[in-house]
Amino acid sequence: MSENTQKNPAYKGKNAWKVYGDSNRLDDVYAFVDGYIDFLNHCKTERETVAFCEKTLRAHGFGDDPKGKRYLKTLRGKCLFAFRKGTEPMSSGISLVAAHADCPRLDFKQHPFVEEAGFAQGKTHYYGGLRKYQWLSRPLALHGVICRDDGSTVPVCIGEEPGDPLFTIADLLPHLAHDQVTKSIKDAFEGEKLNVILGNRPKDEPEDAKDKAETPVKQAILELLQKKYGVIEEDFITAEIEVVPAGRAGYVGFDRSLVGGYGQDDRICVYTALMALCEAGDSAAKNMALMVWDKEEIGSEGATGASSRFISYCFEDVTRAHEPETPVGHVFLATQALSADVTAGMDPDYQETHEKHNSANLGFGPCFEKYTGSGGKYSASEAHAEYYASVRGVFNRKAIPWQAGELGRVDHGGGGTVALFLAAYGMNVVDCGPALLAMHSPFELSSVVDIYACFEAYRAFYEA
Ligand code: MN
Ligand code: MN
């Protein structure tokens, strides 16, 4: 007879504030979330995030030898695999948590510099699913790299330190928006108008100079960049400059119950899983791994995205190092994974977009999604019930708050995660991550207690 016979048969989710309040752990929760906010402030690109993860892992004893008990490998500075050898054989598989470090943003085009009407502007191509109007008339910063043809690289981070200049995209004033406001949002905001203001001061030249610059503001800025950074316009053809929201993440609300900041999809899972891997107990039996991917927001293609073979090379490396007689395919088939990504939380102003019985709520712990996709679960990798139940059991035995939901009303939305790329190897995988409000916006909201509950959940998964 199952112990279920002793329980109230009705299901009720647990509010994580009550869980941590009743057990007097809110000080631990806030100490952890202080660290998370600091992480968000330092990691606004996939490169910065992977660099942070690598530094943290090395400080926790991870190194470059796949034979070691703690191993890490990065690719192009944009994705990362970290591994901890447990006492179980490789043929028992790996407990894997996979998250992504890339976020919606605006990327400089290859020829970014233009001058129109006396303004130097930076042309951009947006990256990922963003709502264009949210990026207008707000402070922006530039992060990334400029690569010269001699192999040298100039790192860029402008707009974050006090005293730095800011950047912005000027929105249309309401007085002149009479035509625009009658359009649908899709037509009202054009991708080609997402041009970043770079400056307005023309090059200082004598009136009667012979070959005066045709674009004197752009010319002045190029000369400034040449002087300050040693780069020329051609170097920007081979640059990766990401335009991201400037400013800091922080607590939101009188009660400081929320965290607001850019890039929480999916750096909230990167941080909580990273800390879980670093802090999982040394006596843990499971082989553990963390995968941090890039390119999730644009379909996971590319060498550093989830559809690349990087993860299989990493699995091969650690299998060959610890148990060369075991085929890597067996390790994949025995592996159990959490696809750690965020989901949409019930939005108080748009409740009609959710199905309230199956939506996630902020403050109730990480949310399982058995399937993602849209239009009849299309493009979803659906978790197997037996595996899903086993993870639920792990969380229950540690009294970690969790919930279950799906993304939006049937036929009214949907989305995908990296789960299907993991499932392609035959491993068990289920989506599990916190709910956000205003996902993909420049200021996403998460719940303080969900952040900590995710950390606890991923650590319990590793230690199970
Ligand atoms: Mn995501
Ligand atoms: Mn996303």
Image: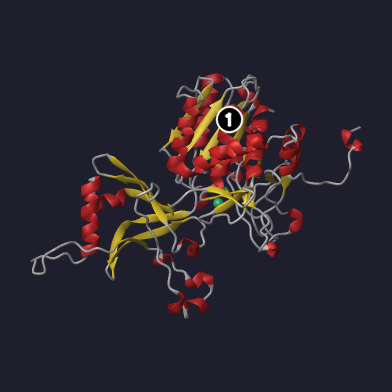
| Coordinates of residue 22 in the picture (x, y in percent) | 76, 37
Q: Nearer the viewer, residue 207 or 45?
A: 207
**Vertical arrangement, residue 293 with respect to residue 326, above or below:** below
Give the left or right position of residue 140, taking residue 254 as reference: left
> Which quadrant is home to the C terminus?
top right
Q: Locate residue 214: give its quadrant.
A: bottom left
| Coordinates of residue 198 in the picture (x, y in percent) | 32, 59
| Coordinates of residue 403 in the picture (x, y in percent) | 73, 45
Q: Is mark 1 within 8 Å of ligand 1?
A: no
| Coordinates of residue 145 in the picture (x, y in percent) | 34, 45
Q: Is residue 303 visible?
A: no
Q: Nearer the viewer, residue 407 or 346?
A: 346
The residue depicted at 64 percent of the width and 34 percent of the height is: 28
Q: Locate residue 90: give its quadrant.
A: top right
**Vertical arrangement, residue 273 with respect to residue 258, above or below:** above
The count of marks equals: 1
Categorize mark 1 by other alpha carbons within 10 Å: few (<14), some (14-19), many (20+). Answer: many
Q: Residue furthest front?
A: 254
Q: Is residue 15 visible?
A: yes
> Which quadrant is home to the N terminus?
top right
Q: Which residue is mark 1?
A: 277
**Vertical arrangement, residue 265 with respect to residue 138, above or below:** above
The residue depicted at 67 percent of the width and 36 percent of the height is: 457
Q: Amino acid at mark 1?
A: Leu
The residue depicted at 53 percent of the width and 25 percent of the height is: 318
Q: How is the image coloured?
A: secondary structure
Give the left or right position of residue 185, taking residue 156 as reference: right
Q: Locate residue 5: give its quadrant.
A: top right
Q: Nearer the viewer, residue 96 or 444?
A: 444
Is disc 1 placed on a helix, strand or loop? helix
Give the left or right position of residue 50, taking residue 213 as reference: right
